[in-house]
Amino acid sequence: MNLFGQQRKKPQKILILAAIPHGLRLDKEIRNIEDAIQRANERDLFEIKVRTAVRPQDIRRAIAEEQPFIVHFCGHGEQDGSLQLEDDDGNKRAVPPSGLASLFKLHALSVQCVLLNACYSEKPAEAISEYINYAVGMNNPIYDSTAIEFAKGFYDGLGYKISGSQDIFQRAFDEGMVAIQMENLSQDLIPILKKKLLFRK
């Protein structure tokens, strides 16, 4: 399904949230997303906003202020499905899947897709998909290089011209998977796409 509809004439915001960069090349991931959108045939349809070193309150406020079409989180995830954010002192602050689901429940009318590019993020993606049409998570640890390749492919796919009836997020997800496979990376079964019940087939 083409979820842009009549809104394709208005740029849609992609909100990138980055936290706890230790050991990750989040700057490279963000740059590759920006490059993918700039190369896209449909680049005028998107506007990128970036927030770094995010704390829980930063995410709440950023989503409320920006009302993004897509929320992209890059950072660390824990085995229980929690995402690592920061506290006021820059230390780790774990946010459980239930907290993330409650947050996105408040923004179900504006946010269409949430991409959690972090290890063990399948659980929060599943929880978020109760309210948001599309959510992408990772069902295992994922290498930084694989996460970056998936992000590049996803946003390449998002920017391609599509037919009026094509599902843009399924198309973007499939492109991300192909990007991993084309680089001969071994983690091509880790990204998982969750769909709200309305969009499940």
Image: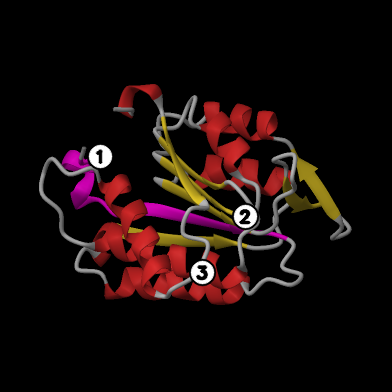
Amino acid residing under circle 3 = Ile
Residue 181, relative to residue 57: is it above or below?
A: below
Give the residue at mark 2.
118
State the CA–CA distance, disc 1 to disc 3. 25 Å
| Residue drawn at the location 69% of the way across and 31% of the way down | 99
Residue 6: say if magenta.
Answer: yes
Residue 125: say if magenta.
Answer: no
Q: Residues within 10 Å of mark 2 (few under 14, many from 20)?
A: many
Image quarter for residue 175?
bottom left
Magenta part of the chain: 2-19
Residue 10 showing in the rendered view = yes
- Residue 148: percent from the left, percent from the top? 51, 69
| Residue drawn at the location 17% of the way across and 44% of the way down | 166
Give the residue at mark 3.
148
Give the residue at mark 1.
3
Amino acid residing under circle 2 = Ala
Front residue of 2/147: it is: 147
The label on residue 87 is none
Q: Earlier in the sequence, mark 1 or mark 3?
A: 1
The chosen color scheme is secondary structure
Asked whether, in this view, residue 148 is left or right of residue 165, the answer is right
Residue 154 showing in the rendered view = no
Secondary structure category for the residue under label 2: loop
State the CA–CA distance, disc 1 to disc 2. 25 Å
Residue 168, relative to residue 20: is it above or below?
A: above
Asked whether, in this view, residue 104 is left or right of residue 158, the answer is right
Q: Are marks 1 and 2 in contact (CB under 8 Å)?
A: no
Disc nearest the viewer among 1 and 2: 2
Q: Earlier in the sequence, mark 2 or mark 3?
A: 2
Image quarter for residue 24?
bottom right
- Residue 52: percent from the left, percent from the top? 65, 63
| Residue drawn at the location 31% of the way across and 28% of the way down | 199
